[in-house]
Amino acid sequence: MNIVIDATWVADRNYNGKITGGALRVLIELLAGLGDFPQHTFYLTCSSYLPEEHEKLIRFNTEIINCRNVKVSVVSFNGLKNKYFRNLYYKLSSYFPVSFFIPFIEKDVLKKTDIYHSCNDAIPRFIRNKKNIKKFFTALDLIPLVRPDFSNQFQDYTRKLYTSLPKDVRILAISQSTKKDVLFFRKDLKEEQIRVVYLGASKEFFYQLDAGFQLEDKLLKYGIKPKKYFLTVNAVAKYKNCEFVLDGFVDYNMKSKVKDTKMLVIGMNREKTYKDYLFNKYGDEKSIIFLENLLDEELTFLYNGAKAFLYMSKYEGFGLPVLEAMQCGTPVICSNSTSIPEIVGDAALNCDPTDSKTFKTYLEAISTDSNLETRLIESGLRQSLKFSWKKYQNDVVDAYSSL
């Protein structure tokens, strides 16, 4: 089959080869494995007509994929090299979605396309109108639509995106929870149109360190010691429930018999500054450390050294950090909301993300019960084996082939 994949996000987000999260990570991991399916020919395309973005996509294909069955198919407007026409193009694009109507795929490729897969953006009209092309879309999460009280960022964009999906679309949902949300918002779609394809976590960056590894030396720069701190990441938005975790830890830390325990909070603050929240409520709380802009290998060290990984998010399309933590052999304490129970199974301590009493009980238990710690480490490692990017790639291509 000839399969066209919209890789616009790779072209316009300056991917530099380092680990990244969210939708871009899902797209990159799918593209990186396409060479393992030589029975198909894949064409990466881009909904921009800017030559420099095409150059980035071509470079990505050459340096990261580098397989004979993966090619780039784009349409460039040479006139956009002119400053006047470029400014005109930008102005027009702000009012009129040019790429939604004007093909950005080469004509000869478009004629032989069997499948078009959009991983992030709306399926363009010039594809929707072609009945011979099967349409696929990757559904990550619908939080602005189903829980605007948690996050209303990009609400208009997300609504237009899911409303625009044609009725004959095939959707690849990253969890049963996401599948449920899609069916809730698009009641005209049938359950059999949506297939669940679970994500994976990078084996290169997230793994359990050998027992003899000198982890203490790596953690010294942060003023922490192995198994003497809790870790939480991506605490950047309201639905991540960071205030709940901070309040629970401070209360636990004041009452616990286990002394000198710290908390590491990793993530950029988009919606509010949790440092200010902490200072205004508790003063100069030195047991909590905020970190941003870490190197990839540093996060591996921090996962491995943590007493437990805390993830009390109220909504997740998948909840990738809990898988990363389990893969590193880190005990997990998490919420029981949306997709998270699907990922952790019985390999974590979970509770309602508003149940502070149970949450603090779990913090104490993991700090004092070595048997519990061992059980969670072992069960977490086993559970993490159920997920991989290779399996994700196989599941996506299997969905293509099933039509």
Image (tube, rainbow, N blue to C red):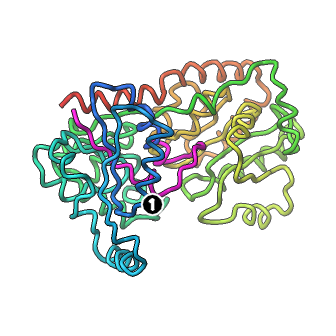
Nearer the observer, 351 or 194: 194
Horizontal and vertical percent position of residue 281: 77, 64
The local secondary structure at tag 1 comes to helix
Q: Quadrant of residue 144?
A: bottom left
Membership of 161 in magenta stretch: no
Residue at (55% x, 43% y) in the render: 352
Please say if 9 is above or below 172: below
| Left or right position of 175 against 349 | left
Q: Which quadrant of the structure image shows residue 52? A: bottom left
- Which residue is label 1 attached to? 52
**Is residue 12 inside the magenta stretch?**
yes
Q: Reply above or below: 106 against 306.
A: below
Q: Quadrant of the C terminus?
A: top left
* Residue segment shown in magenta: 1-26
Q: Residues within 10 Å of mark 1 (few under 14, many from 20)?
A: some
Q: Residue at x 27, y 68 (%)?
A: 98
- 107 sits left or right of 350 in the view: left
Residues 167 and 69: in front is 69
Amino acid carrying label 1: it is: Glu
Q: Position of residue 177 (x, y in %)?
A: 39, 41
Return the residue found at the far left: 131
Residue at horizontal 83 percent and vertical 43 percent from the top: 255
Vertical relation: 386 (above or below) 305:
above
Q: Quadrant of the N terminus?
A: top left
Q: Nearer the viewer, residue 32 or 156?
A: 32
**Looking at the picture, does residue 352 appear above or below residue 368?**
below
